[in-house]
Image: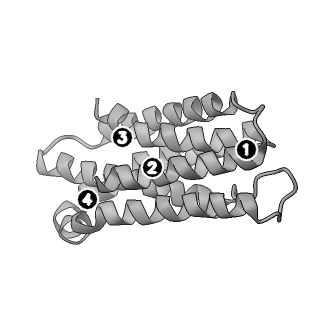
Amino acid sequence: MLSIALGIDCLVVSFSQGLILTQNRKKYSLILALSMGLGQGLFPCVGYLGANSIKTYLIPFAKLIVFAVFFTLGMKFIFEAFANRCKNEICCLDMKCIMAMAIATSIDALVAGGTLSILDTELFIPAFMIGLVSFGMSLTGFWSGNMFKKFPPRYLEIVGGFILITLAFKNIF
């Protein structure tokens, strides 16, 4: 259940990427899913190992960090939709964006790893399951979003941006 709960953000973020991606879909869906899965699988390990020292500093700001990353990426998508730099294709799908999304979606997994440590739960199986489920949910989200390809890319980029901004506010409230 923890794997599914943590994978929901991966699904939604990947859905927004599936909406806006116009080229190299197979390649980017795998890169995105691998980034999401690895982040979600590794961050619980970091949280587990540093539970007592990291949680003191990170937990009070976790929601703000996630908000800032998703809000910034969402606004970037929206601004680039109107920038006319790219002719009918999406501009923001570089590794910096993908890694930022993977890290932002994995902050909850970091905290979850800390709770696993506090509860004296084994780490390997939960971390592996979280990463695997997040990988699968990311692929599912990406290809679900990709089904809406008939819309003009500019509008899809705006919708993708609003989805990320909605996720930012979801994490605050």
Q: Nearer the viewer, mark 4 or mark 2?
A: 2
Q: Where is residue 48 in the image (x, y as percent from the top left)?
A: 25, 54
Identified by mark 4, the residue type is Leu
Q: Label 1, on which residue?
A: 21
**Which structural element holds mark 3?**
helix
Q: How crowded is mark 2: few (under 14 residues within 10 Å), some or many (20 or more)?
A: some
Q: Which amino acid does the dot numbered 1 rest on?
A: Leu
Q: Which of 35 and 141 is in front in this view?
A: 141
Q: Specify the quadrant of the image occupied by residue 146.
A: top right
Q: Counting residues from the N terminus, which is met first, the one under dot 1 or under dot 4?
A: 1
Q: Residue under circle 3?
A: 6
Percent position (x, y) of residue 22?
79, 42
| In this view, 13 is above or below 5 | below
Q: How dense is the environment of label 1, judged by Cα within 10 Å: few (below 14), some, or many (20 and up)?
A: many
Q: Give the camera-side residue of 69 and 121.
A: 69
Q: Is residue 29 visible?
A: no
In the picture, measured across the screen, residue 50 lies left or right of residue 38, that is: left
Q: Is mark 2 on a helix, strand or loop?
A: helix
| Residue type, label 3 | Leu
Q: Are marks 3 and 4 in contact (CB under 8 Å)?
A: no
Residue at x 29% of width, y 35% of height:
2
Check disc 4 and report the residue beneath it.
49
Q: How much space separates mark 1 and mark 2, taking CA atoms?
A: 19 Å
Residue appearing at x 51%, y 51% in the figure: 164
User: Which colour assignment does the render follow?
Assistant: one colour
Measure how far apart labels 2 and 3 are at the Cα level.
Answer: 17 Å
